[in-house]
Amino acid sequence: MIETEITPSQACFHTSELEDDAEEWSELETEMRRDLLALDLRISLFVGAVQNFKYESLLKPVPANYRKSDGEADIETIRELVSRLPELPLLDVSNKQDPEIASFMKTFFLNHNQKLSLISIEEFKRQLSGQIELQLAPRWIFQIDHLSRSQQAWERRKASSSTFCAFHGSRFENFHSILNLGLHQHLNKTSLFGEGIYLSTEQSLSLQYSPCGQGWNKSQLGPELSLLAVCEVINHPDVKRRGSRPSAADSVIPDKYILVTNNELVRPRYFLVYTRPKAKKVKVTSFIERYKFVLFLGLYVSLLLAIGLAKRVTI
């Protein structure tokens, strides 16, 4: 038997790797203890983007170690790692022994630019104090706290102006990008009244643009979700309301629509999360079950008539 001698430097490197893996899992566990469903939602939004054919634009920015040599996202590797994601919470010890998954989860799901937190509908209403009206209550509400330098610039920008809140609806697969990069007018594909970010003061109107999408099949929130963003908007001439015409070639903006032509004037503050309603089981009854009494009564009368007719024939 040939024995391989491990040098002190190799042993030190191996120990360092184990410590890094343990630290990554520790950060994930800390985030789960802080807000398990918030981490769950991050994963669901990421999976929604990964599954879409427009993944290249929806996943931006993708770190270099998850890109191919030509610069494109290594979607095969990303999807393979997604398929190996463990169900939350991470109770199975064997899941914590996969350093590749630990690194993947830390890279994409531990964002230090903003914090996502589950809040109650009562807290949501208290914070907005009547600025908007909820016509359809969501299943969950998540608050977005921006922690990056851009938040400081936002606070300075709105210090000299008033703000208001409005709804923004979009397809499920777009919300990973909305959470991480915000809303951008050039990404909008619906240009009813000109290029820009479309918002509404009416929740039901924005919900029309937020169909249910397929998320993470291990999510505690459910595999199919619909999201609505509640955004804070700075009052500015670039915020077009009813009666405005963005340009001579555009139509006049109707009631309840808001068009923002400057990305820096809009900031998502909350995500309203809806689940697909479970289909009610409808009991299908056959004709015989439905009219059982009438049929039996008819058979009984027919039998009596047949007996009476038989007696007449024999007499």
Image: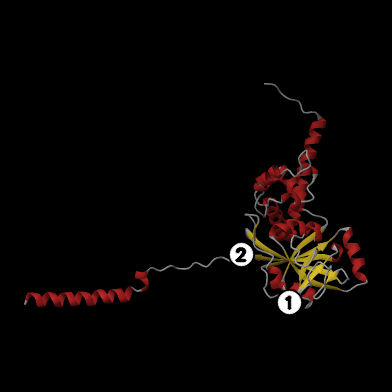
- Front in this rendered view, residue 109 or 191: 191
Q: Amino acid at mark 2?
A: Arg
- Front in this rendered view, residue 114 or 92: 114
Q: Give the image location of residue 285, x and y in percent.
A: 40, 69
- The residue at which mark 2 appears reads as 276
Question: Residue at point 90% right, 66% down?
Answer: 155
Q: Amino acid at mark 1?
A: Glu
Q: What crowding class fits label 1: few (fewer than 14 Cα within 10 Å), some (14-19), or many (20 or more)?
A: some
Question: Residue at point 80% right, 31% down?
Answer: 10
- Front in this rendered view, residue 273 or 9: 273
Q: Is residue 284 left or right of residue 269?
A: left
Q: Is residue 205 left or right of residue 266?
A: left
Q: Give the image location of residue 92, x and y in percent.
A: 65, 49
Q: Is residue 97 visible?
A: no
Q: Is residue 261 visible?
A: yes
* Up/down of 183 relative to 236, above or below: above
Question: Residue at point 79% right, 71% down?
Answer: 258
Q: Quadrant of residue 307?
A: bottom left
Q: Quadrant of residue 89?
A: bottom right
Q: Secondary structure at mark 1?
A: loop
> Residue furthest toward the top?
1
Question: Residue at point 37% right, 72% down?
Answer: 290
In the picture, the disc for residue 133 is 1
The alpha-carbon separation of the residues under discs 1 and 2 comes to 22 Å
